[in-house]
Image (tube, rainbow, N blue to C red):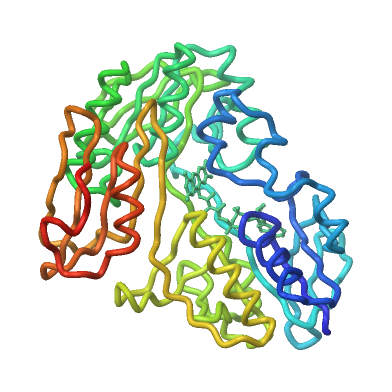
Amino acid sequence: QEEIVIVGAGQAGAQVAQSLRQGGFEGALRLIGDEAHPPYQRPPLSKKFLAGEIGAEGLWLRPPAFYTTNTIDHIPNTRVVGIDRSAKRVQLENGDTISYGKLVLATGTKARLLPIKGSDKDGVVTLRSIGDVDAIRDRLSKSQNLVIIGAGYIGLEVAAVARALGKDVCVIEAQDRPMKRVVSETVSDFFAKLHADNGVQLRLNTGIEALEGREGVESVKLNNGDSVLADLVLVAVGAEPNDQLATDAGLDTDNGILVDGAAQTSDPDIYAVGDCTRFHSGRYSRSVRMESVQNAIDQAKIAAQALLGQDVDYDPLPWFWSDQYEIKLQIAGLSEGYDKTVVVGDPAAKKFYVAYLKDNALIAVDSINSPRSHMMARRVIGETWRDDLLPEA
Ligand code: FAD
């Protein structure tokens, strides 16, 4: 069997390698990643790992020996900088090249940066990797005033951890409610209150003018003229796909590497999986780019099956979760485009769910401390709504 090279040793890349071996692939398998660690899961980075409740080994997807035992050649600290499609080889940063029979791109995303004056100051950070969290933890231990720019999942999860550590936390959000891009007003309001009750200062409808300080950052200047004290600023305004490698190689990209239902790119010898891809969701009749563990794992399994010659068509039901304080938010489906919501349970009791309907069919459910409704939702999304379709919260 011809050699398979995987670029990016994260959740999706590692899963492709594992599934290929499990599926009986016996050829050479290389997993090239630019980080120092064995492949690891990122969700705890802004939760238990940041809180110091688990160490780095608690993040490994598989024990390091797994890769040797399964003859998966994991090559760490190595960045791929180019793809020569006609010669079928990748170029490494140190000038070396590695040939491939089939190539899989699993390069993930990078944190979006803010084009704002002072963003390059010491003490202004983003959160995507173990290295980022190590630096944040070190800095946080010497800081009192944390400013978080962006009230998305990562920003709010970090706010919750920092409050538990006794830090003063201010979250600044340009929109009029937290997590606006993905949840309804009911859910946004619930989380806004949850954070306020826990002592987070949440400033909505607020833009940033500049990050100020003599050397390191000392304050954040807002567009209403106010200034907020800060000795650490986390920029958490979303992520962008690492698709430049693919674009430079002439593959079709559009804010993500374009793949079909078999995770194949516009070059039949090159596949792509995980956060870096964009594909057509038949279920939701639109093009999507997911940033979730569910997608990283499931699309990786599909790519492995396709590489093993099986007929596949990827059309997943997306799901996601976020932990903030004692609250678990679980999301099933994509709610964008809903025309009606039904709230079941009581937000004041911190146990409820919101069902999102379109043309009276259930398209998504956000569950708050209601795991049963989440698991059920994953089975019944797509069906016509009836009051007894899902359980009580
Ligand atoms: P990644 O895991 O990002 O892996 C990509 C790897 O490729 C990285 O190691 C990168 O350094 C490497 N790479 C990139 N370019 C190159 C190159 N040219 N050469 C070599 N290596 C390269 N999802 C959930 O479902 N639930 C959650 O609660 C959740 N919480 C999260 C919290 C945080 C803080 C973060 C950052 C993400 C969270 N996610 C969560 C998202 C989830 O972690 C991602 O969807 C998942 O990791 C995607 O896997 P991936 O393999 O596509 O990308």
Q: Could you say where residue 62 lies in the image, as x and y percent from the top left? A: 72, 49
Residue appearing at x 48%, y 82% in the figure:
313
Residue appearing at x 14%, y 64% in the figure:
385
In the displayed structure image, the side of residue 161 where residue 52 appears, left or right: right
140 to 318, vertically: above or below = above
Q: Could you say where residue 211 lies in the image, as x and y percent from the top left? A: 44, 28
Q: Could you say where residue 192 lies in the image, as x and y percent from the top left? A: 24, 30
Q: Quadrant of the C terminus?
A: top left
Q: Quadrant of the N terminus?
A: bottom right
78 to 185, vertically: above or below = below
Q: Could you say where residue 25 lies in the image, as x and y percent from the top left? A: 78, 77
Residue appearing at x 28%, y 64% in the figure:
380
In the displayed structure image, the side of residue 384 where residue 112 appears, left or right: right
In the displayed structure image, the side of residue 273 where residue 19 appears, left or right: right
Q: How many marks?
A: 0
Q: Quadrant of residue 125?
A: top right
Task: Name the residue nearer the viewer: 120 or 359.
Answer: 359
56 to 5, vertically: above or below = above
128 to 297, vertically: above or below = above
Task: Name the residue nearer the viewer: 42 or 235.
Answer: 42
In the displayed structure image, the side of residue 350 where residue 329 appears, left or right: right
